[in-house]
Amino acid sequence: MLFYLLNIHLKSLYILQLWKNKTIFNDTKQCRIILRERSGRLGNRLFMFASAYGLSLKYSCQLYIDRNIIDELQQTFKINLTNLLSKSQLNNFTSITKIQNHCLYISNLLHANNSYSIELSGFWQVHKYFLDHMEQIREQLRFKQSILDRVKNFLEKNINKNVSTSVGIHIRRGDFLRVRRVSSNKYIFNAMSYFEIKYHSVIFVIVSDDKEYCRKTFGEKKNVLVTPDSFSAADDLATLTLCKHTILTAGTFGWWGAFLSQNRLSDVLTDSKSDHTPLDANCRQDDYFPSWFKFLNN
């Protein structure tokens, strides 16, 4: 698995070098950002969407996002992008450069006054591509009211917010058990202790792709809730955003729960390697983690 991740990183570096040596021009003097690829799960797709939209805002580029991607995300979010390029317009472009990237920040991706048609390929898990336009990203990624109503009803039934502080925990297991690293139970219990020491009364709300395991492992604590099995991935993600604080393990799902949190002053604790790079990926710390994400192993 490490060899696979290293391969992706080296491929990104290679493509970056090719890109630095190549300049594309056309008569319209207009850059275009294109997203047609649908890879991974919800967290991955949010990174791809946010990077494409963020790059289009940063460089004032025209934006094309495949209709299937928009339709899928609109099942969860109130996305309302205007002035997207149409598929027929896209078909008129003869020169499109596809850039494969996993989590590498390319500072000079677009050169001023030149014209490009760039298609994003890979996961593009780099917050620097869209952090400067965080408010526009958050505006597009507002949850549908039906999802918020369902989640708020669950939280209000189980947590007295005037008494207890809610801390959302994302625990990724599933396929990661076979192909990647997952956070240890020791880390999760230590992260819980951090919040129990800091706040008088804490309720932990766990979302996971293995809820049965979480109930068996953490359910003995009286201040732990696990979201219902009936909750969808969208419901679970919304749950994280409605908690006051967040504990992250491996994977991008929890990352987005923290990034879209409705509490702008939230504490975000994340697991990581000893050098504070992501636990499950070969990415640079400051490319992947925003500055307000904290590390338990500081």
Image (cartoon, rainbow, N blue to C red):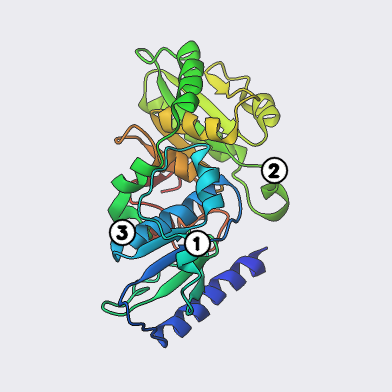
Q: Which residue is mark 2?
A: 174
Cα gap from disc 3 to disc 1, whole angstroms:
20 Å
Mark 2 falls on what kind of element?
Answer: loop
Cα gap from disc 3 to disc 2, whole angstroms:
36 Å
When asked about the image quadrant of residue 122, the answer is bottom right
Q: Nearer the viewer, mark 1 or mark 2?
A: 1
**Residue 108 at what x, y percent from top left?**
34, 75
Q: Earlier in the sequence, mark 3 or mark 1?
A: 3
Residue sitting nearer the eye, 149 or 269: 149
Q: Nearer the viewer, mark 3 or mark 1?
A: 1
Q: Looking at the picture, which amino acid does disc 1 mark?
A: Lys
Q: Earlier in the sequence, mark 1 or mark 2?
A: 1
Q: Earlier in the sequence, mark 3 or mark 2?
A: 3
Q: Which residue is mark 3?
A: 57
Q: Is residue 103 visible in the rendered structure shown here?
A: no
Q: Within 10 angstroms of label 3, few (less than 14), some, or many (20 or more) residues?
A: some
Q: Which residue is mark 1?
A: 87
Whether the residues at callouts 3 and 1 have beta carbons within 8 Å, the answer is: no
- In percent of the image, x 59 and y 24: which residue is there? 226
Q: Is residue 115 visible in the rendered structure shown here?
A: yes
Find the residue positioned furthest to the right.
178
Q: Within 10 angstroms of label 2, few (less than 14), some, or many (20 or more) residues?
A: few
Residue sitting nearer the eye, 161 or 223: 161
Q: Looking at the picture, which amino acid does disc 2 mark?
A: Gly
Cα gap from disc 1 to disc 2, whole angstroms:
36 Å
